[in-house]
Amino acid sequence: MMSSSGSVYLSLGNKDVSEMICHFKFIFVCIFLIPQPTVGGSVTWYEPSPERTTSNTAEVLPPGIVQVYEGSSATLNWNFNVSVGLGLGFVIKFNAVGIISIRADGSASGPIRAEFQKRFNVRATPQSASLSISPVTIADDKSNGEFSCELSDAIGDTWKRAIQVHVIVPINFIGIRGKPTVFESDNLQLTCEALSRVEPNITWTKGKPGNQGNTGVVQEGKVLTITNIKRTDVGTFTCTAYNGFGKPENQTVYVNVTYPPKIDNFQPEYIVGVQQSLTLNCEAEGNPPPTYIWTPCDPEQVCNKNTLDISQVLNDVNYTCRVANVHGNDSKTANVYIGGNVINITIVITSEPCIDGKYNQSLFLEKLKKPLREAFADKTGYEGVQLIGVRCGIIIADLALKFNSTTKEQDVIMTLNDAVRDGKLGEFSVGAIKGKRPDVEPTDGGATSPLDSLSRIVGIIGIVVGAVFGSVAALAVAGILVWWTCWKKRRNTKGAEGKCCIHVITFGNSSNETGRSTDIAVELPKPSQSHYMALEDRTRSQVMVDASPLSTEQISEYASLNPCTRSWETPREHVTIKQIIGKGAFGQVAKATAVNLQGRAKKTLVAVKMLKENASESERKDLLSELELMKQLKPHPYVIKLLGCVTKSEPMFVLIEYVPFGDLLGYLRKSRGLNDTYYKDPDIKPQTNLTSQQLMKFAWQIADGMSYLSSIPVIHRDLAARNVLVGEGETCKVSDFGMARDVQENNIYERKTRGRLPVKWTAIEALLYGKYSTKSDVWSYGVLLFEIFTIGGSPYPRMDGRKIANFLQEGYRMPKPQHVDDKLYDIITKCWKDDPNLRPSFEKLRNKLKEMDNQHKRLINLKNYDDRLYVNVDDLAV
């Protein structure tokens, strides 16, 4: 409706007015709820950062961040400025819980809340506040809440700024799990165990050798894995853990890769002059570092380093360097040869006369020049020969052979030996060729040595005196010669250590000869003691170390023979002699039967060893000694078995197992149609035409038996084919222990008396110094092998036993039979090494021969066997 004045009037009823009032109420409420800025008021926050200014109390500002390690101290700072007219107080809070209230003038309106008083402290001004926390704990972390400063004005408006504390907990390294030492080609796995409130980032790095600690990242993650690890992977590995706060934490571990040793850069051959010094090098790589051992090695040498110093080289020697660690071993051998451009040799000529020291040396040299040129015609580098000197008796000539290049002495000697064998040395008959050594002093003008003079004079005068005066006068003259030789040697040596004495050696039953003979032996000057050393100590606990295991039947057969549980004595009336089957000078062997032997009711066929009526007391003691030794032996299939004895009355009987084929020497010879001079049994005939396989079997069986005896240790001292018996199934059994010795102290026996001595089977150290060891038996075994492989041939055929020691010192060894292979001959010659320690053990000999058993036809070619070479068998006495 409009008034008269033009005004419009709204005409409303009561209902309309009520609705209008409701609408106004809604508008008023909405307006009241919208935050309204304080008229002209604002706050600027300088701390915490970032700086912010706001006039809107509802505005949410970004919190400040403070990082701090657990257990350390922290200070939270608020710094602000307010506009004019605002008189503000403020409250410091943690979450919604107030810590302390501050008035507008900066003074506290009350104390710090009780639960915060131990760790919190507050300082304030009208425009700032600082909250100190010490120590900081996990409870202060942002995950549990935030600290804030709230400003309030008079009408109740507030401005808030928060600070969040990030509590850093140091990484806890538990350790590195896994084995850091691994074998090469295996897999490595190491786990880095690190704990943190925040999952740490873990990396593996390896230090770069020689690069001042610089590292390269190997792998990411907790587990370090290296498959098929190599020795180049050795080094220090570092596990680094970082959780984003503070500094990274790390731990190190050394990875060690182990592997067996291997010898590298090894020189296998050296050629040096006589008496020159030499150093051998043996560089080996291995982890753990390997140990070193050199063999052979003298006590004066250092043998456990990677070098071996040799003060002077006197002979060809093979030195073996052995390295070992827990994972394996390696070895290499350096062959050291005597050699050079000039090779000095000594040659023994048996076909040339030399009387009274007179010999035409110029003519001798001229005769030698042409055959030597022919001998070395196919060898490049030979230039000529010079005669150094000649010694008489037999002709012993020292020669210097010149070459235009370095030459091995052994090659020269081998060429000369081939020339001798092929008859290329013209009219000369050669007894031995060896390298010349400094201890052999040549004489000018063919002057004779006492030894050479002795051999000549004994031969000439012995014949004359024997013809005129007989044996008594011959012995008297021999005594004069002893005095003359010793006097001359003392005068020539002027107090040198050498000694010259002559003694009579009588050979009896131990050598199984048919008579007695007298031999004159000369003790030569003693060389360095380093060549003759006692063997390693061993004890009776090692008795069966080298013995072959017995079968069930053999154990049953020998069960009643335990020397500790039985009595050996047998009543004489229980033994019935059947026939004599073998005779020697003082002893004999009979076939017999025995009843109630070892508790057996039936008769047992046995062999009985007994003395002849003309035997002396010393022979009786020898038989008793043999009996006592046999009582100590445990059963072995290749050693003769003792069954009993009769010692309480005369004659003394030693009962042993009966062997139907007799002794091995006779067995070998009878197989060729020859006569056996000792063991005769008409009931048993040996197989004719023995095979190479049978010969090889004989060889290793005897080595097996001797391996057992040497383990006790027993030194046999008379090992020969004649002292080996052949039983059922052609089983060889070592027997005849009349000269044997049971030694315990140092495994070496020194002969003090001048008893019987089988010269041709005796080792050089025993001939010269009377010293025996199991390695002396090895020498005898080498001679026994010669007997076996020549099917009963005599060692050193047609050689005077009185000269054998001289020849052996000159280096002479029996040559290889033409039907025997080099490998088999090499085994024989190893038994004849000058140094006993360089000879193989019986255990090694047994094993080697058994390995070669299936090669018997190649090793012993009986098609090339010349029976004529071994028909004239010598007397066993020498």
Image: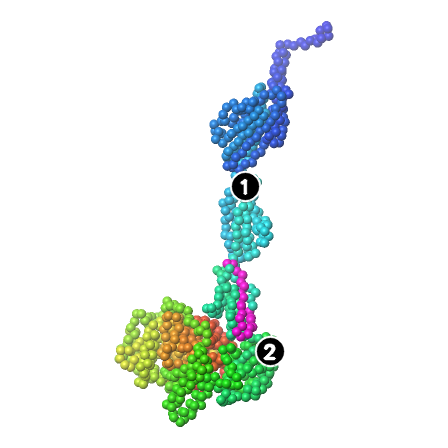
Of helix, strand and loop, which one carries label 1?
Answer: loop
How far across and down, in percent of the image, does residue 143 sit?
53, 34
Q: Residue furthest bottom?
A: 468
**Above or below for 274 versus 12:** below
**Depth order, front residue of 728/708:** 708
| Residue visible at 30% across and 74% down in the picture | 568
Name the chief secondary structure element in magenta: strand
| Residue visible at 41% across and 74% down in the picture | 773
| Residue visible at 56% across and 40% down in the picture | 246
How far across and down, in percent of the image, does residue 153 sit?
58, 21
Q: Left or right: where does residue 622 sit relative to residue 70?
A: left
Is the C terminus in the top left, top right, bottom left or bottom right quadrant? Answer: bottom left
Asked if one can make out residue 681 in the rendered structure from this viewpoint, the answer is: no
Precedes in sequence: disc 1 or disc 2: 1
**Depth order, front residue of 254/124:** 124
The part of the image, by quadrant, that contains residue 536 is: bottom left
**What is the crowding at mark 2: few (fewer than 14 residues within 10 Å), some, or many (at least 20)?**
some
How far across and down, in percent of the image, does residue 399 sit?
55, 81
Label 2 amino acid? Answer: Phe
- Whether residue 714 appears in magenta in the rendering, the answer is no
Asked if one can make out residue 107 in the rendered structure from this viewpoint, the answer is: yes
Q: What colouring style does the render use?
A: rainbow
Question: What's the CA distance linking mark 1 and mark 2?
Answer: 82 Å
Q: Which residue is mark 2?
A: 403
| Residue visible at 42% across and 84% down in the picture | 487
Q: Which residue is mark 1?
A: 199
Residue range in magenta is: 268-288
